[in-house]
Amino acid sequence: MHNHPLAENEMALDRWDRLGLFLSSLCAIHCLLTPLLVLSLPLVSESFENPWVHIVMAFFVLPVGLYAFVSGYRRHGQKRVLVFGLLGLFLIAGAAFWPVLFFAGGLAKEGRFFWEEGVTIIGSFFLLSAHLINRRACC
């Protein structure tokens, strides 16, 4: 039994309407938030430059990553998840805590090592890769 052509048309039209509503809503949200985002950029960029941001983020990233990689490894047994994940966690932790622990300047901006951002980015790529591999292996 075939559906009536008008019913199919109405369903297609309804899908397009829902998509249009969704895209229009996104547009409105974008138009409302963009000026606020642009005005807050100096404050946001300054806060991300603060070494405490990396330390606070590391306190969240380290336990979550460790739990995800160890429990994922127990489930699927892929060692590369552990290797990539632990390497990423080590790099993130090193970049966040090394300057604080081993540099006399403490958390002062002048006391930050030039390589912190690079090590953090590399560690993040390892974490991202490990999470993607872990997710695929678990599913």
Image (tube, rainbow, N blue to C red):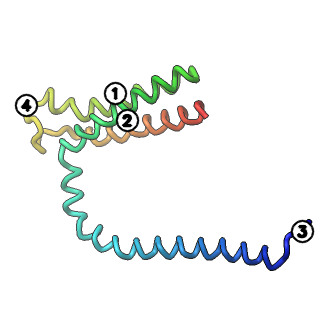
**Residue 91 pos. (x, y %):** 33, 31
* Residue type of the residue flagged with mark 3: His
Q: Mark 3 or mark 4: which comes first in sequence? A: 3
Return the mark for residue 104.
4
Q: Tell me if mark 3 has few (under 14), some (14-19) or many (20+) residues whose alpha carbon lies within 10 angstroms of its own.
A: few
Instruction: Tell me how many marks there are.
Output: 4
Q: Position of residue 52 (x, y in %)?
A: 18, 42
Q: Nearer the viewer, mark 4 or mark 1?
A: 1
SS class, disc 3: loop
Question: Would residue 97 appear left or right of 81 to someone viewing this image?
Answer: left
Q: Which residue is mark 2?
A: 123
Instruction: Work out how far the residue at label 4 is from the one at label 2, CA to CA, in angstroms.
Output: 25 Å
Q: Residue at x 20, y 53 (%)?
A: 47
Question: Label 4 vs label 1: CA separation?
Answer: 22 Å
| Disc 1 target residue | 90
Residue 84 is left or right of residue 62, and the answer is right
The picture places residue 139, in percent across and down from the top left corner, at 61, 34
Do tag 2 and tag 1 residues touch (Cβ < 8 Å)? yes
Who's the residue at 78% across and 75% down the image?
7
Give the label on residue 128, or none: none
Label 3, label 4: how far apart the Cα atoms are: 78 Å
SS at circle 1 = helix
* Picture coordinates of residue 81, whole percent (x, y): 50, 27
Instruction: Place residue 56 in its image quadrant.
Output: top left
Front residue of this view, candidates 1 and 116: 1
Q: Amino acid at mark 1?
A: Phe
Q: Residues within 10 Å of mark 4 (few under 14, many from 20)?
A: few
Q: Nearer the viewer, mark 3 or mark 4?
A: 3
